[in-house]
Image (cartoon, rainbow, N blue to C red):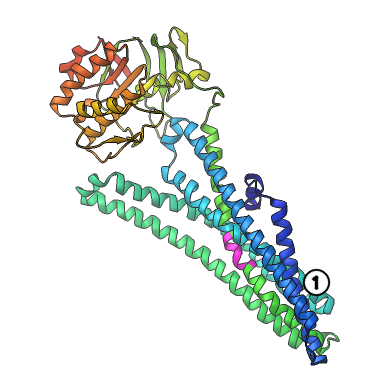
């Protein structure tokens, strides 16, 4: 079972102690049946107080409570330890994977696996241990029935076996349907994400709004139907299991005496054992759906980890450190996206150009010309499929990409504005305040404890705040992807005539995507892209 393998592999909790105490707890629980039956027989034979049986019962009960409590507590610790390890490991791998995986993988799928599925696994731990304990009780009860009457044992095992076989018969179908339901849930979350991310677009387009909701509604309905169908199978199994007990009791009382020489005391003893068996077996049977869902969750998160591993490249063990930047050169560099349908795959190249330290490069081109792809090649987020990138005159090898990326501080068009200055141990408060004033943000946000108090700003203001964070990183090469596009004319002019010049005077190298031809004179070099090709160099 994948769930058991998961806890065995991921948890560092004392598994032997948990198993041992769970076993003792189950044995103590089962032994209660013997004590109760012996006490009941003694009452029939004598009216004396059952002091011995009472203290035996009390001792066994204390042992049961202690061992069960210990095993359940340790199971909870083991589960959370395992969840913590897998969450952190997958998250660590996720941050080290390559950009193409992040761009192609469904974000909702990743969120679901790391949060929802791990929570389901966490919830299953106590149920798993409790069900294992109750299974021991079931075994002891069956052995007790066998000791009372072999025909009664055969009858009991036969009826219970039918219930188990029915579950095993349906378990494969249920597992398949649960996988389908998990996939539909991810699609549903993607639909919700589309509402949140594309709210402006659907708010001004009623047909698009209705069509999106209709799509989400269809997915939700399909997920509901799958879950209902699966749930009905669970209900059938549960009802069949409960009905089996009533049939079993009837068989013991009405049929067993007719088939074998079974005394009244034996019938009463077997009936008590079956009734005692009913509770534990109900717990075991009702735990099957949780086990099935938890197994699917384990498979999902391991599959996610396997997918991430498939896209990731080996990371250097030593600390990354950027080389001293002197020059960057592209020689016949090409990159193409995987072909999604009929037709040619989009890409850029072959590209040839050179950028030296301290220069300002403008990249110009229309939508779909390949500017964003070129920036990802420049920053090492994409690996070229052909050609060579030279850094300081030396070919850039795959093993050196981690160091190469450390050259850059970037503000892409789809940048994320972090509220904390991650990676900057202690920013200078006066410097940050001065930058906030320069960017006209001193009344919009404050900086304290390495954190900005407010990031709920307009797009232009967010870009200015991102610029502050970028400058504080103090990298050698700065990339600004249409940074000035969302600024008012005053800040747009300030960017081209002051900010870029200041970076150049500090020896920084700047790569900027721009459409402002009136400011092209601020650049040392300008390259124009069209359909992934450089059609002009200035």
Q: Which residue is at the far top?
A: 393
Q: Which element is circle 1 on?
A: helix
> Does residue 201 lie above or below 252 as drawn?
above
Crowd class of label 1 (few under 14; some 14 to 19; many from 20; radius 10 Å): some
Q: Is residue 227 left or right of residue 36?
A: left
For the C terminus, give its image quadrant: top left
Q: Which residues are magenta?
A: 284-290
Tell me the chief SS of the magenta region: helix
Residue 124, image quadrant:
bottom right
Q: Identify the residue at horizontal 24%, vertical 26% (top origin).
A: 435
In this figure, which residue is indicated by the disc labeled 1? Answer: 143
Q: Identify the residue at horizontal 72%, vertical 78% (top origin).
A: 274
For the question of whether residue 165 can be seen, the reply is: no
Instruction: Locate residue 448, reporting x and y percent.
Output: 32, 35
Residue 45, image quadrant:
bottom right
Q: Identify the residue at horizontal 33%, vertical 24% (top origin).
A: 472
Q: Identify the residue at horizontal 82%, vertical 75% (top origin).
A: 146
Q: How many marks?
A: 1
Q: Which residue is at the far left?
A: 489
Instruction: Locate residue 394, reporting x and y percent.
Output: 47, 8
- The foreground one among 366 and 198 is 198
For the question of whether residue 227 can be seen, the reply is: yes
**Is 286 a magenta residue?**
yes
Instruction: Locate residue 409, reporting x and y percent.
Output: 35, 23
**Is 241 a magenta residue?**
no
- The foreground one among 423 and 217 is 423
> Does residue 338 lie above or below 378 as drawn?
below
């Amino acid at each position: 079972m994948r769930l058991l393998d998961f806890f065995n592999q991921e948890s560092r909790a004392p598994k032997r102690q948990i198993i041992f105490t769970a076993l003792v707890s189950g044995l103590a629980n089962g032994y209660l049946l013997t004590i109760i039956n012996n006490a009941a027989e003694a009452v029939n034979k004598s009216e004396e107080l059952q002091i011995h049986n009472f203290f035996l019962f009390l001792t066994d009960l204390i042992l049961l409570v202690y061992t069960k409590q210990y095993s359940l507590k340790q199971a909870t610790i083991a589960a959370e330890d395992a969840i913590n390890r897998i969450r952190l490991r997958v998250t660590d791998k996720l941050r080290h994977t390559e950009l193409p995986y992040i761009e192609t993988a469904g974000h909702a799928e990743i969120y679901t696996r790391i949060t929802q599925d791990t929570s389901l696994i966490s919830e299953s731990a106590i149920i798993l241990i409790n069900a294992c304990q109750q299974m021991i009780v079931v075994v002891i009860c069956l052995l007790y029935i066998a000791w009372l009457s072999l025909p009664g044992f055969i009858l009991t095992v036969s009826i219970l076996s039918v219930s188990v076989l029915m579950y095993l018969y349906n378990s494969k179908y249920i597992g398949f349907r649960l996988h389908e339901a998990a996939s539909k849930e991810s699609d549903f979350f993607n639909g919700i994400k589309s509402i949140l991310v594309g709210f402006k677009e659907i708010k001004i387009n009623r047909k698009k709004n209705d069509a999106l909701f209709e799509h989400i509604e269809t997915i939700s309905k399909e997920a509901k139907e799958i879950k209902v169908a699966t749930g009905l199978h669970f209900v059938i199994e549960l009802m069949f299991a409960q009905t089996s007990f009533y049939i079993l009791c009837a068989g013991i009382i009405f049929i067993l005496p007719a088939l074998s020489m079974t005394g009244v005391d034996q019938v009463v003893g077997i009936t008590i054992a079956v009734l005692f068996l009913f509770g534990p077996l109900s717990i075991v049977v009702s735990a099957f759906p949780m086990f099935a869902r938890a197994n699917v969750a384990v498979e999902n998160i391991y599959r996610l980890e396997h997918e991430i591993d498939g896209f990731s490249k080996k990371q250097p063990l030593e600390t990354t450190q950027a080389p001293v930047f002197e020059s960057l050169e592209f020689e016949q560099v090409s990159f193409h996206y995987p072909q999604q349908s009929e037709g040619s795959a989009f890409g850029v190249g072959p590209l040839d150009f050179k950028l030296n330290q301290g220069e300002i490069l403008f990249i110009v081109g229309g939508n779909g010309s390949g500017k964003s792809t070129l920036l990802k090649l420049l920053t090492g987020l994409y690996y070229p499929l052909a050609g060579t990138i030279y850094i300081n005159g030396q070919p850039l090898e795959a093993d050196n990409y981690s160091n190469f990326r450390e050259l850059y501080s970037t503000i892409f068009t789809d940048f994320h504005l972090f509220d904390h200055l991650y990676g900057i141990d202690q920013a200078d408060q006066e410097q940050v305040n001065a930058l906030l004033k320069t960017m006209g943000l001193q009344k919009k946000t404050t900086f304290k404890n390495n954190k900005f108090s407010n990031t709920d700003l307009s797009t232009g203001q967010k870009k200015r705040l991102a610029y502050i964070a970028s400058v504080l990183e103090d990298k050698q090469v700065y990339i600004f992807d249409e940074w000035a596009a969302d600024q008012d004319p005053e800040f747009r002019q300030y960017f081209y005539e002051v900010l870029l010049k200041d970076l150049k005077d500090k020896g920084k190298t700047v790569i900027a995507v721009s459409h402002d031809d009136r400011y092209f004179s601020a650049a040392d070099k300008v390259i124009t892209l069209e359909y992934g090709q450089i059609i002009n160099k200035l």
